[in-house]
Image (tube, rainbow, N blue to C red):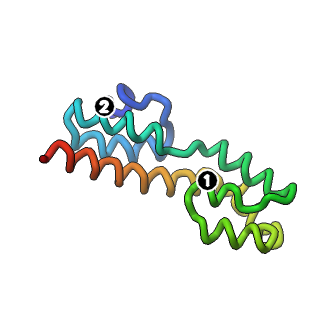
Amino acid sequence: MSKVLQHLPELDGDEQVEVARLLNKMSDAQAEQFARIYRTRRREPTHILILAAVGLLGAAGLQRFYVEEFGMGVLYLLTGGLCVIGTIYDMINYQNIALRYNRQEAMEVAETVRNVYDE
């Protein structure tokens, strides 16, 4: 857990636990490289909530585009956020949406960092 606090102190909750698990398998140089890349790729849960709230005003689906779920983004856009129900669901579950996206990005970044240092 100390590596995640040293390299990514801004993380909290489940995201911190997930990233700590990945960082424990890395050297300090790998962890530093991981932190640099991960910071640029991760998504803030509050941004997802704000974008979902904007969806209530007519631009539904922006939160799905933000987490690179383009198919769902188009579906929300064309259906008014699945008749607003999908948008409300996303506003309730915004932290889970962010965690799912960030978990996937963390695994991809960790794999990239490991591959670079293995060469």
Which residue is nearer to you in this view: 75 or 8? 75
Which residue is nearer to you in this view: 10 or 30? 30
Q: Position of 35 compared to 79: left or right?
A: left
Residue 37 visible here: yes
- Answer with the quarter of the image where residue 47 lies: top right
> Residue at position x 44%, y 28% from top?
9
SS for dot 2 = helix
| Marks 1,2: beta carbons within 8 A | no
* Quadrant of the snapshot with the N terminus: top left
Determine the CA span between mark 1 and mark 2. Answer: 25 Å
Above or below residue 80? Residue 99 is above
Residue 104 rendering spot, x and y as whole percentages: 42, 56
- Answer with the quarter of the image where residue 86 lies: bottom right
| Mark 1: amino acid | Tyr
Q: Position of 83 compared to 65: left or right?
A: right
Outermost residue, right side: 57
SS for dot 1 = helix
Q: Which residue is mark 1?
A: 66
Q: Which residue is mark 2?
A: 32
Residue 107 rendering spot, x and y as whole percentages: 35, 53
| Mark 2: amino acid | Glu
